[in-house]
Image (cartoon, helix red, strand yellow):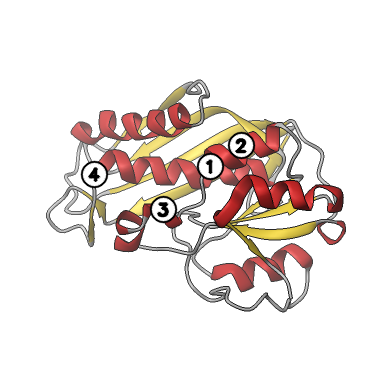
């Protein structure tokens, strides 16, 4: 597992967003729905990293009442792109105090549906490239395609998923393998992957060729 916690058989994951949205003082100006879609993307990838699938979502909205439906729209867009039903969503909005910048968080609650093999017995790749801030909006073709990843998980083409966050691929590889790891040449090891624009995937040795064909140019060798 990466950052999930397990409580009485439930897998709990989360992510948040600050100063990204449609407010005048936001640091990154983007549609609120898009911001929510990417936050949901991270929390969902964390579910997959723990072997889980989401059953319910809690939205914590600090931006204001009018943003609520936009955030719900963005979450819905993510699951629509995955051809999956939107889980039940609840939560609350800060409506007493008006904030100058956008801010919200998502908590996902799920259950484990996949057993996980040890990282060392799998062949690891990076899917997509690290991007953050405005680059996420400008270079969508470099973002890991979650629909491809979900189908690969469901069809057992890949065994494990490990999202890359703001500390970069090198840090995540160290957490995954429990030691400092030499990365393949050409990987941006220290670059932030922002809202999990890059994912690490573990593939059984006998399915490596199939996975490379399936993901095509989105796939990059992780290790030397």
Bin the neighbour count of mark 4 within 10 Å (Cα to Cα): few under 14, some 14-19, many 20 and up.
some
Q: Nearer the viewer, residue 196 or 1?
A: 196
Q: CA distance from mark 2 to mark 4?
A: 25 Å
The reply to whether callout 3 and callout 2 are in contact (CB within 8 Å) is no
Q: Is residue 47 above or below residue 81?
A: below
Say which mark, if any, is on residue 146.
Answer: 1
Q: Most extreme residue toward the left, as rendered?
A: 24
- Closer to us: 5 or 143: 143
Q: Position of residue 190 (x, y in %)?
A: 53, 76
Residue drawn at the location 23% of the way across and 36% of the way down? 67
Which residue is labeled 4 in the image? 31
| Residue at the spot of label 2 | 150
Q: Which residue is mark 3?
A: 141
Pointer 4 with pointer 3, Cβ within 8 A: no
Disc number placed over residue 109 in the picture, else none = none
Q: Position of residue 35 (x, y in %)?
A: 33, 46
- For the residues labelled 3 and 2, the Cα–Cα distance comes to 18 Å
- Is residue 161 in view? no
């Amino acid at each position: 597992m990466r950052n999930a916690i397990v409580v009485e058989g439930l897998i709990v994951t989360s992510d948040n967003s600050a100063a990204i949205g449609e407010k005048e003082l936001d640091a990154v100006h983007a549609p609120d729905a898009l911001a929510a879609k990417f936050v949901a993307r991270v929390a969902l990838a964390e579910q997959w990293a723990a072997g889980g699938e989401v059953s319910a979502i809690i939205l914590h909205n600090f931006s204001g009442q009018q943003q609520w439906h936009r955030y719900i729209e963005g979450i819905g867009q993510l699951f629509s792109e995955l051809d999956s039903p939107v889980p039940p969503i609840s939560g609350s909005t800060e409506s007493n105090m008006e904030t100058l910048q956008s801010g919200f968080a998502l908590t996902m609650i799920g259950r484990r549906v996949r057993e996980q093999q040890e990282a060392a017995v799998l062949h690891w790749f990076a899917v997509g490239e690290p991007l953050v801030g405005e680059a996420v909006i400008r270079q969508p073709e470099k973002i890991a395609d979650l629909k491809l990843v979900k189908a690969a998980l469901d069809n057992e083409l890949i065994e494990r998923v490990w999202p890359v966050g703001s500390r970069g691929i090198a840090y995540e590889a160290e957490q995954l393998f429990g030691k400092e790891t030499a990365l393949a040449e050409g990987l941006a090891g220290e670059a932030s992957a922002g809202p999990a624009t890059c994912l690490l995937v573990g593939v059984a040795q006998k399915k490596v060729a199939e996975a490379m064909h399936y993901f095509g140019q989105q796939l990059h060798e992780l290790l030397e």
